[in-house]
Image (spheres, grey):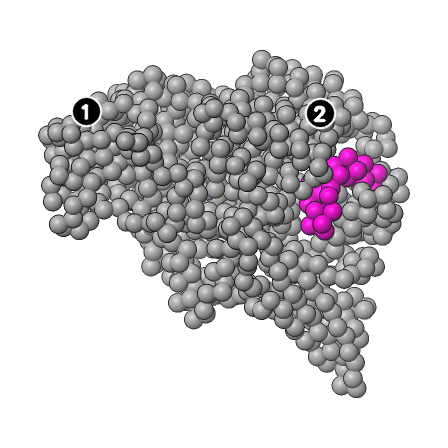
């Protein structure tokens, strides 16, 4: 008889509530690096009396069961089954009344290289339980809809012992924690290490004092202040913007060096990748500071959107992630510049999510099946999940949005909720039918939206009719897509540059739909999809002059930037196909950067050319096979032309945007540095690297030093600077990560793979550390023309490292494999090489479920 294997594909439609209620969890840890003991006391009750259901607990195969009792008695071994990743106690062995299950298990954190469950990082114990890591700690109903209070004892000789909730007991070699807020296992956390804290406090709106700590390794304490300031700003902002207060006596943040993701929102004990906590002017860039603030906010905001209201099952992941990303984007907009933040978010969305949506890994924000949930922490779930909420808010308005959110917190506090619950809240708060809107959650793919203008004049004035047509290309498993509701923000600008119609939201619900504007004087220029009011690909018949007009006159900063972007992309698309192009862009950009009254951040954004990847994406959207070498060349040529044409202007900017005085990561000085760096990277193409050389030697902040280093590597003269950095920061992991990533990323395509191979040989290429691995392997993959080298050398290098990482840390290997997701859009030679690489990965014996799912979706 064949053993029945665990079901491989999980389906949303198969959801069933857990048949038992868990009213309390007590855990007791005795921490030993290679033999940690975990005792668990779980208080269960049958969900329905008279039910006769087995109790199924999740537990990794490596979890050693030492003892098991039910209400204090050992069950008959015939009633206990250990199979794959579960432990089942037969219904016959369970009373039809509340009962307790007591287990003791042994695990080996030191041998855990997956950084999931309980593991060790630099001598400290640390946990990561989302999504299904808790089952590697002990036997448990490891699913988000099973929520209970946790009481946790920790015994260890490490000097700092932390868990969720409030500290309720402390003695030598031990602490006890109690978290009064029922939570699922994925929010459990434990840390034990030799740590020091930066401490502060925060008084909530209702006057409760909360102790705040940022825990770091001794020696790092001078780089944690910004994280603490960001936390305080986040707490204040959530009170002001959403009326949400913090709910425990203490909030702890811990920085760890080995972490698979950015950070984790464990209740009252956030655990962060150290690169998202530690910052000093000498070691972190402006971009790092901004990310730290954003992610500290993100994890803090999860306390309400994720923790107090969690997800019923993992298909609902975007319920917490989309909303929390949306909230952290609002936070950053409020702390910094809203238009700049919007432009940057749209850039990320296009670079990561549109790319995902257009390829073999496309899936809806709420998927209905998966094999490995860790493969669904994607740009679609996070970034598109946030865009969908932005659209909802645009459709109903700010006040209704706030009312709906109040209702959501009110109605679902303490729940494990679904996307249906979320949409019902909006329906009930506004009276709107959201049936059609729901397609944004259930359907994959980026809608293509075409706009056609029609102008007619009568004696009563002119009428402009805009006809929009929408169409969403097929995605895996979803061949046909119904029309979606699309909020299209439109404004009209008169020929003299004045706005004749301020922003209106057109609500498109049909496959094709016209909107008319009557009584107009002269034919206006249409500013469409302002603020990127919907995540769609807009096409329209528009010439360079009109784009240049919008770039000069549109009062909506996003639309202005977009007009400039479109000019640049049109030029690069033409140039990469051997056609002429770029004159209008070069001219327009000259006017824009000469305008000293314009926001430096905005000018910097306009000066940065679209990347190779973005050009390739555009070409493929137009149905053209992208040629990475031609794209690279086109981009080089256009940049050089801008530099030559505007040499004096750029030099003036470079000199005048120097920021003096003490370093500050605030929006204003960062913007000046960004503009200065944008000018530098253009000038670098014609000054032989002279400015970069000087800047590298004189700059006192990492922002400018990294920019200078990148320029020097591009000119083939980075060696001295790299050596200097190595000597100065060889023992600083975060700076060394930059050192490892900038080289393959900025190297000319023909030498980048060789550079990466050489770096991979170094003894300080500590590849099991996710940051270091991503720096080098991800750095090479981000060099478009190198990764897609025609001889397949880039594909082979990355594939080798995916296969090497897979048995050690499947999550990281699987995540890296997505760099291949665009392979179907290239030419036959490249496609063949990519396919060989992917098939080689697929053929590995014992390949993880994570990587197997990714690769098989990509070659399906
Ligand atoms: N929930 C985390 C976040 O978005 C991300 C994460 C997922 C971290 C899985 C670790 C593991 O903030
Ligand atoms: Zn999150």
Q: Is residue 557 above or below residue 514?
A: above
- Spatial CA distance of label 1 from label 2 is 55 Å
Q: Is residue 284 visible?
A: no
Question: Is residue 802 rendered to the left or right of residue 128?
Answer: right
Q: Earlier in the sequence, mark 1 or mark 2?
A: 1
- Which residue corresponds to the image point at 68% horizontal and 25% vertical from the top-left? 793
The residue wearing badge 1 is: 67
Q: Quadrant of the C terminus?
A: top right
Considering every residue shown, the one lying at the far top of the view is 763
Magenta stretch encompasses residue 629: yes
**Disc 1 on helix, strand or loop?**
strand
Name the foreground residue: 583 vs 645: 583
Q: Residues within 10 Å of mark 1 (few under 14, many from 20)?
A: few
Classify residue 428 by image quadrant: bottom left
Q: Residue at point 81% right, 32% down?
A: 684
- Disc 2 target residue: 752
Q: Quadrant of the N terminus?
A: top left
Describe residue 15's horizontal placement relative to residue 545 as left or right: left
Residue 843: image x %, image y %?
A: 52, 27
Q: Position of residue 796 (x, y in %)?
A: 63, 25
Residue 560: within the magenta?
no
Total of numbered circles in the picture?
A: 2
Q: Residue furthest bottom?
A: 459
| Residue 335, percent from left and from top | 56, 48
- Answer few, some or many: residues within 10 Å of disc 2's Cα (few below 14, many 20 plus, some between 14 and 19): many
- The image shows residue 545 at horizontal and vertical percentages of 83, 59
Q: Residue at x 74, y 69 (%)?
A: 453
Disc number placed over residue 843 in the picture, else none: none
The residue stretch that appears in magenta: 612-638
Q: Secondary structure at mark 2?
A: helix
Task: Decide whether the magenta segment is chiefly helix, strand or loop.
Answer: helix
| Residue 549 falls in image quadrant | bottom right
């Amino acid at each position: 008889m064949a053993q029945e294997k665990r079901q491989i594909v999980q389906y949303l439609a198969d959801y069933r509530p857990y048949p038992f209620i868990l009213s309390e969890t007590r855990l007791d840890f005795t921490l030993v690096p290679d033999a940690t003991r975990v005792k668990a006391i779980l208080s269960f009750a049958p969900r329905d009396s008279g039910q006769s259901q087995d109790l199924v607990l999740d537990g990794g195969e490596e979890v050693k069961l030492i003892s098991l009792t039910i209400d204090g008695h050992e069950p008959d071994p015939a009633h206990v089954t250990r199979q794959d990743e579960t432990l089942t106690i037969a219904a016959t062995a369970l009373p039809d009344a509340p009962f307790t299950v007591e287990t003791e298990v042994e695990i080996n954190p030191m041998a855990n290289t997956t950084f999931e469950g309980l593991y060790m990082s630099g001598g400290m114990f640390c946990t990561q339980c989302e999504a299904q890591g808790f089952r590697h700690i002990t036997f448990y109903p490891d699913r988000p809809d099973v929520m209970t209070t946790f009481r946790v004892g920790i015994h260890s000789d490490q000097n700092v012992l932390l868990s969720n909730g409030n500290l309720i007991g402390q003695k030598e070699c031990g602490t006890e924690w109690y978290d009064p807020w029922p939570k699922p296992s994925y929010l459990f956390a434990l840390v034990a290490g030799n740590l020091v804290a930066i401490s502060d406090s925060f008084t909530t709106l209702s006057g409760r004092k909360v102790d705040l700590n940022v825990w770091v390794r001794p020696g790092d304490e001078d780089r944690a202040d910004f994280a603490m300031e960001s936390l305080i700003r986040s707490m204040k902002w959530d009170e002001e913007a959403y009326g949400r207060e913090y709910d425990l006596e203490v909030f702890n943040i811990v920085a760890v060096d080995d972490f698979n993701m950015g950070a984790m929102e464990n209740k009252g004990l956030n655990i962060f990748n150290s690169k998202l906590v530690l910052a000093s002017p000498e070691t972190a860039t402006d971009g790092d500071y901004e990310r730290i603030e954003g992610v500290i906010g993100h994890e803090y905001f999860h306390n309400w959107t994720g923790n107090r209201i969690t997800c019923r099952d993992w298909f609902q992941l975007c319920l917490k992630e989309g909303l929390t990303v949306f909230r952290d984007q609002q936070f950053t907009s409020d702390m910094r510049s809203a238009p700049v933040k919007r432009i940057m978010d749209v850039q990320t969305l296009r670079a990561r999510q549109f790319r995902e949506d257009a390829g073999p890994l496309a899936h809806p924000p709420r998927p209905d099946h998966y094999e490995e949930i860790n493969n669904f922490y994607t740009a679609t779930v996070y970034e598109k999940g946030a865009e969908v909420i932005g659209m909802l808010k645009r459709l109903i308005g700010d006040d209704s949005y706030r009312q709906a959110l109040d209702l959501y917190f009110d109605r679902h506090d303490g729940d494990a909720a679904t996307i249906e619950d979320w949409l019902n809240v909006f329906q009930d708060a506004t009276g709107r039918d959201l049936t059609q809107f729901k397609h944004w959650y259930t359907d994959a793919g980026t809608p293509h939206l075409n706009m056609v203008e029609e102008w007619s004049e009568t004696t009563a004035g002119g009428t402009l009719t805009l006809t929009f047509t929408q169409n969403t290309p097929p995605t895996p498993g979803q061949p046909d897509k119904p029309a979606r509701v699309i909020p299209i923000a439109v404004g009209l600008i008169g020929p003299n540059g004045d706005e004749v119609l301020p922003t209106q939201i057109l609500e498109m619900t049909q496959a094709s739909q016209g909107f008319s504007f009557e009584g107009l004087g002269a034919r206006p220029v249409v500013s469409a999809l302002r603020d990127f009011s919907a995540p769609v690909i807009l096409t329209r018949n528009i010439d360079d002059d009109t784009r240049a007009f919008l770039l000069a006159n549109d009062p909506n900063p996003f639309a202005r930037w977009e007009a400039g972007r479109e000019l640049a992309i049109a030029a690069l698309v033409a140039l990469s196909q051997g056609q002429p192009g770029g004159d209008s862009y070069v001219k327009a950009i000259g006017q824009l950067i000469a305008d000293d009254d314009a926001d430096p951040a905005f000018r910097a954004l306009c000066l940065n050319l679209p990347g190779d990847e973005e050009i390739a994406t555009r070409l493929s959207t137009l149905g053209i096979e992208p040629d990475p070498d031609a794209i690279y060349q086109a981009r080089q040529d256009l940049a050089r032309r801008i530099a030559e044409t505007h040499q004096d202007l750029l030099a003036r900017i470079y000199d005048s945007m120097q920021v003096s005085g003490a370093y500050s990561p605030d929006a204003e000085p960062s913007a000046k540095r960004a503009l200065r760096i944008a000018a530098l990277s253009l000038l670098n193409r014609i000054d032989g690297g002279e400015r970069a050389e000087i800047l590298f030697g004189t700059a006192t902040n990492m922002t400018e030093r990294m920019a200078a280093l990148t320029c020097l590597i591009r000119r083939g003269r980075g060696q001295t600077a790299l050596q200097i950095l190595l000597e100065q920061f060889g023992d600083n992991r975060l700076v060394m990560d930059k050192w490892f990533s900038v080289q393959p990323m900025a190297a000319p395509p023909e030498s980048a793979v060789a550079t990466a191979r050489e770096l991979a040989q170094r003894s300080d290429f500590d590849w099991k550390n996710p940051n270091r691995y991503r720096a080098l392997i991800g750095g090479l993959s981000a060099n478009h023309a190198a990764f897609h080298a025609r001889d397949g050398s880039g594909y082979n290098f990355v594939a080798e490292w995916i296969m090497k990482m897979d048995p050690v840390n499947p999550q990281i290997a699987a995540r890296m494999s997505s760099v291949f997701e665009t392979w179907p859009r290239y030419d036959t030679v490249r496609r063949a090489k990519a396919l060989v690489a992917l098939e080689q990965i697929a053929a590995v014996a014992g390949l993880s479920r994570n990587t197997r799912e990714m690769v098989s979706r990509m070659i399906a």
